[in-house]
Image: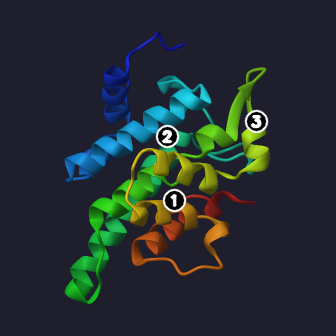
Amino acid sequence: MQKSINREQLIEKIKEIMPECMWIENEELRTKVLEVWCDAMEKGGWTIEDLSTMPFTLLLDPCPGSFLDHTRSVTTVTYHSGQTLKKFFGDKISINMDYMIAGAILHDIGKLLEYEKKDGKVVTSPCGKSLRHPFSGVGLGFAGGLPHEVLHMIAVHAKEGDMGKRTPEATIIHHADFTNFEPFKK
């Protein structure tokens, strides 16, 4: 169980367990991303330790990885996909790497409100029964002052975005997310 820590300590812990945050070069954006993580953890009642043990999905039983593993893997796949596209297509494709990394790090942030710990298990929360994580994630990001481009990526990364047009960054995150989910389905 996590001892009571202040916000600055929580931000430092998040940076330790998720070093990919430092890939965001814009310091103001990086700070906002970390603040949104803090807000989500506080509102959802999650600790740093929980992030390494809570499942990234309730749709797979057993879930093959933690919420932290999934977030870091999606972010890493997203980052390398963006770098690869830029390498081979140069200025023929416009990718805002900072926004895309922020979107990847936050794509599932709403799950910290969609899920809750109950009787030692992670289950769908009352909030999650009404709102899936893309919606609560956008709410967290909006309250945190994130750019609308990043909110778009959070909003459309899952099936809720299938009817709309995704930006290149959102498309990459969407596919990175499903690359980190579909292979585990049996």
Which comes before the other along the chain, label 3 or label 1?
3
**CB atoms of marks 2 and 3 within 8 Å:** no
* Marking on residue 68: 2
Q: Residue at x 53, y 27 (%)?
A: 42
Q: Kindly identify which residue carries mark 3.
A: 123
Label 2 and label 1: CA atoms lie apart by 17 Å
What SS does tag 1 mark? helix
Please, what is the three-letter code of the amino acid marked with disc 3? Val
Residue 53 in sight in this render: no
Q: Position of residue 172 (x, y in %)?
A: 44, 71
Q: Residue furthest bottom?
A: 92
Please, what is the three-letter code of the amino acid marked with disc 1? Ile
- The one of 165 and 175 positioned closer to us in this rendering: 165
Please, what is the three-letter code of the amino acid marked with disc 2? Leu
Residue 36 in sight in this render: yes
* Marking on residue 40: none
Which comes before the other along the chain, label 2 or label 3?
2
* Marking on residue 154: 1
Q: Would you identify the image quadrant in which residue 9 lies? A: top left
Q: Position of residue 134 (x, y in %)?
A: 60, 56
Q: Position of residue 149 (x, y in %)?
A: 40, 66
- The one of 110 and 65 positioned closer to us in this rendering: 110
Q: Would you identify the image quadrant in which residue 81 lies? A: bottom left
**CB atoms of marks 2 and 1 within 8 Å:** no
Q: Nearer the viewer, mark 2 or mark 3?
A: 3
